[in-house]
Image: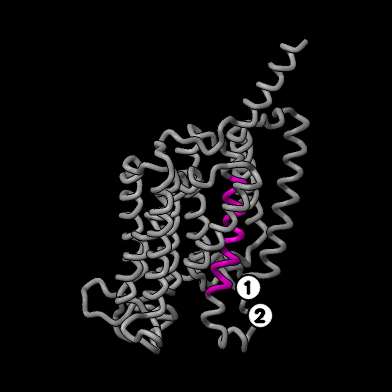
């Protein structure tokens, strides 16, 4: 539909003032982020203004030269929506995380690690499913901005990253998973809009009035097809409200995430009936299922087993459980207090 959101360059020299304005906005946003992270940004003095002005001018000129050198520079819809989904997940976690001991710096550290592992995992699974195509042109393996990411692979990668992060920073994985699950729904819903704009993950032919035509697949499907990406986006928004409502009815921390795995598997299983592409191929051992549907069954079973295992744990209110028992500053303050008492 619109895989390229906007193209930058080539520009004339007056464009440097517009670039400078964008750089200034980025500086202001960075200072606000520093305050949100509990750090005090550098005071605004005449020396700071002079240094910042010189930096903005230099950066603006360099950016203009680079954009004109490689123009047109394409900003792709899929990458933008993926980034927006990532930010939405962070904002939600920051809304519900602090009362449970998660500070914004901790959330950002976890989110960056999750993003890296998720992209690697999502791309790896997608490339494996289309190995013959990528084997003929290995250079395109890293072209993630064109789309071609498997949600199942991304979820697995993010799950591994979260487990590693929790062991590293001594955070309770079960509580952290509960906090992040609604954010996963939001991020998925926004990213699927990127799939729609990119023209990937499309559906099969349909006569329904809301069928759409994708120029990228016009040679294969000249007729309207299901906007399966939008079905998935709307379904994920529905899952967001379901898991939020279910959270207060859980009896153990960590049960919300396996519940999401089961609900998502049901949603994805149904969507596979309208979908085309790699995961919609027939699963050879069970011709009645597609590859995606078979994967959904395995994930749903895994989620159910995970949920039941947690059900055997001692009762604990998930809404009152803390991911981090005490913030790092509180621990430091407690240590100072004890040392003063000894004196």
Mostly what secondary structure, the magenta segment?
Answer: helix
Front residue (pair 329, 108): 329
Q: How many marks?
A: 2
In the picture, the quarter occupied by the N terminus is bottom left
Numbered label attached to residue 79? none
Q: Which residue is mark 1?
A: 142
Horizontal relation, residue 339 to residue 310: left or right: right
**Residue 182 seen by the camera:** no
Find residue 275 and report its image quarter: bottom left
What span is colored magenta in the figure?
Answer: 108-125
For image coordinates 65% across by 48% down, the residue present is 20
Residue at (44, 64) in percent of width and height: 194
Q: Residue at x 43, y 59 (%)?
A: 188
| Secondary element at image label 2 | helix
- Tell me whether the residue at label 2 lies in contact with that at label 1, contact meaning CB atoms closer than 8 angstroms: yes
* Residue 231 in sight from this viewpoint: yes
Q: Nearer the viewer, residue 191 or 325?
A: 325
Q: Which residue is mark 2?
A: 139
Which of these two is toward me, 322 or 204?
A: 322
């Amino acid at each position: 539909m619109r895989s390229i959101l906007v193209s930058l360059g080539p520009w004339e020299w007056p464009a440097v003032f517009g670039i400078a304005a964008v750089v200034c906005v980025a500086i202001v946003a960075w200072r606000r982020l520093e305050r949100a992270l509990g750090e005090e940004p550098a005071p605004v003095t005449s020396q700071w203004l002079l240094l910042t002005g010189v930096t903005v001018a230099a950066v603006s000129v360099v950016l203009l030269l680079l954009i004109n050198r490689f123009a047109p520079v394409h900003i792709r819809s899929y990458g933008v929506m993926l980034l927006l989904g990532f930010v939405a997940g962070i904002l939600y976690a920051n809304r519900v995380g602090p009362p449970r001991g998660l500070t914004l710096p901790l959330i950002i550290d976890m989110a960056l690690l999750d993003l890296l592992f998720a992209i690697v995992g999502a791309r790896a699974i997608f490339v494996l499913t289309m190995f013959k195509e990528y084997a003929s042109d290995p250079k395109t393996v890293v072209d993630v901005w064109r789309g071609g990411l498997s949600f199942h692979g991304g979820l697995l990668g993010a799950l591994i990253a979260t487990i590693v992060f929790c062991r590293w920073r001594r955070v309770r994985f079960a509580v952290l998973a509960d906090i992040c699950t609604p954010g996963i729904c939001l991020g998925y819903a926004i990213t699927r809009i990127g799939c729609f704009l990119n023209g990937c993950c499309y559906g099969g032919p349909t006569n329904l009035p809301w069928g759409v035509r994708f120029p990228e697949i016009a040679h294969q499907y000249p007729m309207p097809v299901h906007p399966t990406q939008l079905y998935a986006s709307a379904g994920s928004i529905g899952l967001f409200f379901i898991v939020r409502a279910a959270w207060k009815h859980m009896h153990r921390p960590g049960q919300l995430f396996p519940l999401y795995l089961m609900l998502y598997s049901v949603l994805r299983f149904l969507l596979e009936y309208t979908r085309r592409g790699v995961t919609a191929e027939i699963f050879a051992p069970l011709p009645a299922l597609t590859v995606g549907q078979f994967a959904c069954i395995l994930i749903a079973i895994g989620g159910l087993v995970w949920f039941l295992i947690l059900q055997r744990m001692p009762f604990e209110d998930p809404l009152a459980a803390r991911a981090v028992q005490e913030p790092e500053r509180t621990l430091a303050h407690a240590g100072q207090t004890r040392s003063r008492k000894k004196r």
